[in-house]
Image: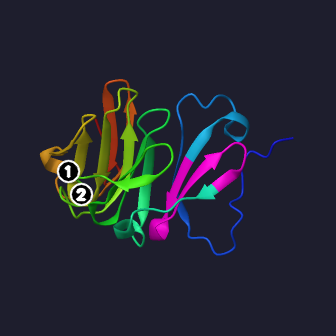
Amino acid sequence: RERPLVAWPQPNRSPLTSVAVAPGSGASLLTSGSGLAVGLDGTALHYDARTGWLVDPVPPRASRVNLFGVAYTSSTTAIAVGQFGVILRWNGTTWTEDPQSISLTQSQLNAVAASPSGEAWAVGTFGTILHFDGSSWKVELPPAEDSGVNITSVAVAGSDVFAVAAGNLLA
């Protein structure tokens, strides 16, 4: 019988903060899919059905940065976000720093979500909202009453984007 949870077999590991499963991974990540996980101190892992969870190097500037969110933008590409406005891109084999990483904001990015079209939204402290249109990131403003609050999560459903800020739902 397959175990529903898979251990990360490293005794000196950094805590993980987010996990994502690639679209189209089927009924079981363990037998046919691919996944990503990120965490503290620049920890990044990818899952390969043949070998299990593998640790991936991240770009030097992100190697000591806490990563808080990860989301697939396609079946093989993904985005991870974290402290100081860092944005990383996964191309299916390696992590690179997004050209706009840290330049749009130095605020902590708490979460990221993507749509099947490849668009993505990253959210964070001080009301930070970033929108990726498939080629570049742009700053978006939250509703005036939520300006400056900590936006902790984001989700995409079709053309709708939802976020949680200070315990309230933003749509």
For the point 32% across and 28% down, which residue is it?
160
Please give the residue where the numbered disc 2 appears in the rendered image.
149
Please give the residue where the numbered disc 1 appears in the rendered image.
146
Q: Which residues are magenta?
A: 36-53
Front-most of residues 1 and 36: 36
Separation of marks 1 and 2 at Cα, in angstroms: 6 Å
Q: On the rendered structure, is 80 left or right of 142?
A: right
Residue 42 on the magenta segment: yes
Q: Quadrant of residue 62?
A: bottom left
Count the marks: how many?
2
Mark 2 residue element? loop
Expressed as whole percent of the image width and height from the top left, the position of residue 18 reads 50, 54
Residue 6 on the magenta segment: no
Dominant SS of magenta comes to strand
Quadrant in which the N terminus appears = top right
Q: Determine whether label 1 and label 2 are within 8 Å by CB.
A: yes
For the point 39% across and 63% down, which residue is it?
59
Front-most of residues 168 and 101: 101
Residue at the far right in the pictured view: 1
Q: On the rendered structure, is 60 left or right of 25?
A: left
Front-most of residues 160 and 17: 17
Expressed as whole percent of the image width and height from the top left, the position of residue 54 reads 62, 56
Give the residue type at disc 1.
Asp
Determine if residue 30 is in view: yes
Front-most of residues 77 and 15: 77
161 relative to 42, above or below = above
Determine if residue 154 is in view: no
For the point 61% across and 71% down, which residue is it?
13
Q: On the rendered structure, is 126 left or right of 161?
A: left
Q: Residues within 10 Å of mark 2 (few under 14, many from 20)?
A: some
Quadrant in which the C terminus appears = top left
For the point 24% across and 37% down, which residue is it?
135
